[in-house]
Image: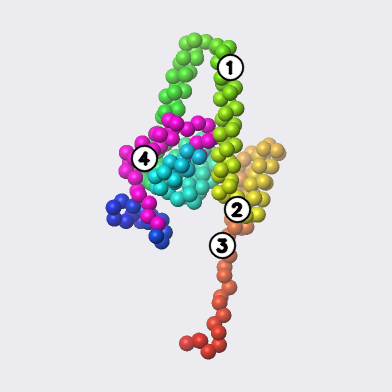
Amino acid sequence: MPVSAGGSREDGPGRAHIQPSLWMIVRAFGRIGLTSFGGGRVAYFWHEIVVRRRWLTETELLEGLAVSHVLPGPNIGNLSVYLGQRLRGGRGAVLALVAVVAPGAVMMLALTVLYFARGQTPAIAPVFRGVGAAAVGLAFGSAVGVGARTVRDPAAALLAVLTFAGVALAGLNPLAVIIPLALAGAVLRRPRERPPTAVPAGEEQ
C-alpha cells in the first residue's frame, strides 16, 4: 500500500487518506472500546475510521468485517486486528486490539469483583435483562446498516438469505454455511470479461 509524501496513503486515483500514527490508532480504537456497546460496535468503527477520520474506505472496512466473521474468535477483536494491520502493520494490529479490548475487560473485571463481593442482588437482574434487549437492538441496527451498504444486487441478497436460513433457521454450524456460500459468491460475483471491441473497417493500422 503506497504512502505518499506527508504520511498519506493513495487508495486510488484522486483519493488520499491520512496514515495515522500509532498514538492516533490507540486513541481512536480506545475511544471505540470505551464508548461502544455490543453488536453495534461495527457502526462505531464505520463512523470513527471511515467517516470521521477517513483513514480507510467503506469498502476496506466491509472487507475486514467479512473476514472477521469467517475467522474464529470474537468478531470485534478480529476486525480490530485487520484494521490496525491495514493502517500500520503488525504494531498497528496489536495496539488496535489492545485499545478496543482493554476498556471493556477492565470494566468487566471490576463488575465481577463487585458482584462476588456483594453477592447476587435481585434489583440487578432487571438491569441485565434490559441491557440484553438493548444489545439485541444494537446488533440488529448494525446488521441493517451494513446490509444496506453490501446487499445491493440479487446475488448478494440470495447469499444473505441463504446464510440466515442455514444458521438461524436450520441451526447449522456457521462455517458449514459460510464456506460453500463464499465459494458460490466468488463464482456469482466474479468480474465479467468484456468482449473485445470490434474495430470499424478502414481504421485498422
Residue at the (49%, 10%) spot, across then down: 118
Looking at the rendering, the stretch of residues picked out in magenta corresponds to 15-42
Label 4 sits on residue: 25
Label 2 sits on residue: 152
Q: CA distance from mark 4 to mark 1?
A: 37 Å
Q: CA distance from mark 2 to mark 4?
A: 31 Å
Q: CA distance from mark 1 to mark 2?
A: 41 Å
Q: Which label sits on residue 191?
A: 3
Q: Earlier in the sequence, mark 2 or mark 3?
A: 2
Q: Earlier in the sequence, mark 2 or mark 4?
A: 4
Q: What x and y, as percent, mark residue 70?
A: 55, 43
* Of 91 and 23, the residue lying toward us: 23
Q: Earlier in the sequence, mark 3 or mark 4?
A: 4
User: Is residue 65 a member of the stretch shown in magenta?
Assistant: no
Residue type for callout 3: Pro
Q: What x and y, as percent, mark residue 3?
A: 33, 54
Residue at the (37%, 55%) spot, across then down: 16
Residue at the (33%, 52%) spot, across then down: 8
Q: Earlier in the sequence, mark 4 or mark 1?
A: 4
Kindly report which numbered mark, 1 or 3, lies closer to the viewer in this rendering.
1
- Of all residues, the one furthest to the top in this rendering is 118
Q: Is residue 180 visible?
A: no
Residue type for callout 4: Ile
